[in-house]
Amino acid sequence: MFIVEFSDWLANTAISQYFQVTLWVIPGMQTIHILCLAMVLAGAVMVDLRILGRGLKSESMAAVAERFLPPIKPLVIVLLITGIVLIIAEPGRTLGNPAFYVKMVCLVLALIVTARLRRYAATATTGDRAPVLLALLSMLLWTTIIVAGRFIAYIEPI
Amino acid sequence: MLESFAEFLQTLPVAVLVSENLFPEVEAAHVVALALFFGTLAIVDLRLVGLTSRHMRFTQIHDQVLPVSWFAFVLAAITGSLMFMANASTYIHNTPLMIKFALLALAGVNMLFFQFVTFRGVAAWDSGEPAAAAKLGGYLSLGLWVAIITCGRLAGFV
C-alpha cells in the first residue's frame, strides 16, 4: 500500500532519523502546535460567540471578525510546519492513522467556514440574519480538529 | 503520606473508570479546554500589557472575554484532576508535572495579586498606556501559562 511504503521511506530519510533521535523535537513541536491552536481556537470562538450575541458585545461584528480572524492564517501556517515536522518524526504513527485524516478533512472544512464567516462579517448590514449555524459549526469543527489530533496518539494506525 | 494519598485517589471508582475506559476522551477534552483557556487569556493579557486591542478599554476586554477563560479553566481543572487521579501513584514521581503544579500555584498568586491589588487602580490605566504593575502581571501570566502548557506536554514523555 502506497501510504505504508511512503511512511517507511520517510522514516528512513536522514531528516526523519535526525528528528527521531533528537529528544526535544517531538515535545517541542507539540508544545508550539498546542500554543498556536489555542490562539486559533480562541480567535474563532470570539467571532462565533459574537455572532451568537455573546462575548465582545461592545464591538461590532465586523470589528471582532477583522481583529480575530486574520491571525488565523499565519497561525495555521505555523501549525502546518510544526505538524509536518511531527509527521516526518513519526510517519507511521500519523500517515496511517484514520484520526489524522479526520483532522485534515475538518481543517479544510473549518477554513472554508472561517472564510465564509469573515465574508459575512465584512458585508453584513444591520437586519441581516446572523449565521448562527455557521458559528456553531465553526466551534464544532475546531474542537473536532483538536480532539482528532489528540486521538492520533490512541487510535492504531492501519 | 503522599504515596498513600496517591494510592487512595487511584483506587477511587472514578479514577479506575478514567484509567481503564476514558483516558483518551478526558485527555482530548483537557486539550480543548486548555486551548480555549490559554487562547482567551492571551487576548486579555496582550491587552493588559498594551500590545493589542488598544482601542478598547481594558475593563471591556476583561469583562467580556475573561468569563470564557474561566469556563475553560474549570473544564481544564476537572479533566486535569481526573487524569491525575487515574495515574496518581506514577504522576507524583513525574518531575515536569510537579513543576507544572508549582507553576500553577505561582500563576494563581499572580492572578490574585492582579485582581486584588493592581486591578483596584484600573481607572488610571483603563485606556492608554497600562501601568507598570499591570504590564508586569500580564507578561508574568503569559510566561507562566506557556511554561505550564510546556510542562504538561513534557509530562507525557517521562
Image: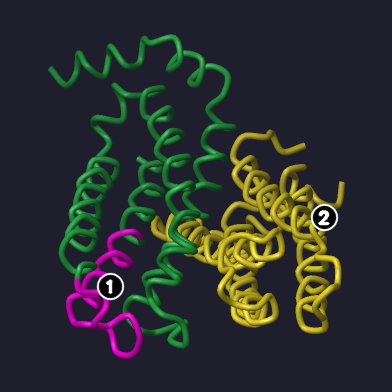
Point 75% across, 59% down: residue: A135
**Magenta span covers which residues?**
B121-145
Rendering quarter of residue A66: bottom right
Picture quarter with the C terminus of chain A:
top right
User: Does residue A119 appear anywhere in the picture?
Assistant: yes
Point 67% across, 35% down: residue: A155
User: Does residue A15 appear anywhere in the picture?
Assistant: no
Instruction: Kindly report the distance in space between the C-alpha atoms of the residues bearing marks 1 and 2.
Output: 37 Å
**Left or right for A118, reference B119:** right
Which color scheme does this rendered protein use?
by chain
Q: Which chain is green?
A: B
Point 40% across, 38% down: residue: B77
Q: Is residue A9 magenta?
A: no
Instruction: Say what amino acid the circle numbered 2 marks.
Output: Leu
Q: Are marks 1 and 2 on the same chain?
A: no
Mark 1 vs mark 2, foreground winner is 2
Which chain is mark 2 on? A
Q: Identify residue for label 2.
A: A133
Which element type, helix, strand or loop, lies under badge 1? Answer: helix
Rendering quarter of residue A112: bottom right
> Where is residue B110 shown, x and y percent of the image?
20, 59
Q: Relative to residue A113, is residue A77 depicted above or below?
A: below
Q: Identify residue for label 1.
A: B139
